[in-house]
Every structure is written in C-alpha cells, then in structure tokens.
Amino acid sequence: MIRIVQSFYVKSAANPADYPASAYPEFAFCGRSNVGKSTLINLLTNHHQLAKTSSHPGKTRLLNFFLIRYKDDDQGTEGRLQFTDLPGYGFAEASLVEQEKWRRMISHYFEQREQLRGIIVLVDIRHPADEKDILMLELLRLRGIDHCVVATKADKIGTTKRAKTLLLLAKGLGLKEEPIFPVSALNNTGLDALFGWLSQRLS
Ligand SMILES: Nc1nc2c(ncn2[C@@H]2O[C@H](COP(=O)(O)OP(=O)(O)OP(=O)(O)O)[C@@H](O)[C@H]2O)c(=O)[nH]1
Ligand SMILES: [Mg+2]
C-alpha cells in the first residue's frame, strides 16, 4: 500500500489549456460543497494546510491541482501522482450562470484529462442519498470513469448505527460494484481502505 511522503500545491485552473502539463496518474475529489473534499486531501497528504478548507460552502471554485510523492514499501517502489480538488456542487447561492460554468469545467476535465485514473465521490454520511450525487455517479458510469465513494464525517454517526447507515446510503445512491468507505477527519479513521483503492490503481 502506498503512503504519501510529500505534497505540493501546483496551481488552480478552469480551462484545459491551463492544467499542469505533467502526465502523472491523477485522482480527483468531487462532491457537494462543504462535504469535506479539501479536508480529505489534507488528511491523506498529512498536510493540514495544503487544500484550503472552510465552513462556508463554495470556497473552491476552480480545479486545484496537487503534486504528490508516494512510496510503496511492500513493492519497494516510489512515484508521483496528482490529486485534483474539484469545485463543489450544490451550494444554495450558486446562480444558474455559475452552475453552467461548473458543469462545463467538470465535463471538460472528464473529457480531456488523459491521465485521470479515478474519481473519489464524497457524500456526507448523515444525509440521505442526494439527487446531485446520484447524477454524478451516473455520469461516471456512463463515461466509464473508475470511481469510489467516501462517506465523510463518520464521527457524526454512532458506531452502532454506522454499518446500517452505510448500507442505506449505498442503496440510495444506487451503488453497484463501487465501494463506499466511511472516513472521519476528526478521528483520522478510514484512510487505509482508500489508500488500498488508490494503490490498486497505480500498479
Ligand atoms: N466532524 C467532521 N467535520 C468534517 C469532516 N470533514 C470535513 N469536516 C468539516 O466540514 C467543513 C467543510 O470541509 P471542506 O473540506 O472545506 O469541504 P469542501 O468539500 O472542500 O467544500 P467546498 O470547497 O466548499 O466545496 C469544515 O468545517 C471541515 O472541518 C469530518 O470527517 N468530521
Ligand atoms: Mg474545498
């Protein structure tokens, strides 16, 4: 399994022409605004100020690219990959013009980012399956883009209820083959399964 040894912010961009030119394998994080995308990137990289987090939804309005150096101790290898923090969807104040801008930004990214290896779709463990997340998952299946789901803020649900909540959420989201991993940034739990998923897509 990989572990991250170093991470850097590279740049923010809206248009494909401005994406970083590097060809390292890339994974992107998407989900509703405020679900915890930036927090998860910081947690995975163990770099608490890498991606800017906020309690105000809609903080990230561009694609933010991060370069990551990792080691795989089992395989004795090391390498580089990239994480992309995608702008969140579904915040209340977004105008129609902004929503259309978002839609174009995301579809260009999915169409044109050749080194894209997978998408991590984040959902809040406390909320029932959301229409916008269901649409995103359908889009990924349609485009044949590999993906998994991370249920964030797992600390907000008691441990006895967690398994049942996840099962209901998976059903509501219409998950088929896709795994769903509960993660808590507060307690630093659930990362191993996600690191395992990433590792499988790098070898
Ligand atoms: N309790 C708890 N809070 C969390 C967890 N993950 C994120 N949060 C909080 O949720 C809020 C939003 O987190 P962000 O990481 O900024 O969310 P985001 O998805 O990047 O939001 P946008 O950039 O607006 O799309 C912050 O106040 C975080 O501290 C978690 O696992 N547990
Ligand atoms: Mg963010």
Image (cartoon, helix red, strand yellow):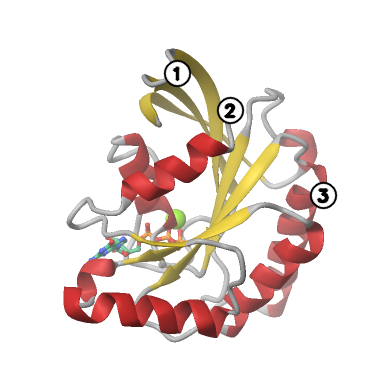
The residue lying at 43 percent from left, 84 percent from top is 168
Tag 1–tag 2 contact (CB < 8 Å)? yes
- Picture coordinates of residue 138, whole percent (x, y): 71, 72
Q: Amino acid at mark 2?
A: Ser
The residue lying at 69 percent from left, 47 percent from top is 14
Judge by depth and name the residue closer to the eye, 17 or 176. 176
Query: Is 118 situated above or below 2?
Result: below
Side (left or right) of 34 relative to 190: right
Q: Amino acid at mark 3?
A: Glu
The residue lying at 72 percent from left, 53 percent from top is 145
Separation (CA) of disc 1 from disc 3:
32 Å
Say whether residue 76 is visible: yes
The C terminus sits in image quarter:
top right
Write down the quadrant of residue 84 in the picture.
Answer: top right
**Residue at the disc numbered 2:** 203
Side (left or right) of 102 relative to 48: right
First in sequence, mark 1 or 2: give its number. 1
**Residue at the disc numbered 1:** 75
Circle 3 or circle 2, nearest the eye? 2
Neighbour class for label 2 at 10 Å: few (<14), some, many (≥20)? few
Side (left or right) of 152 relative to 187: right
**Residue at the disc numbered 3:** 111
Q: Amino acid at mark 1?
A: Gln
Say whether residue 51 is visible: no
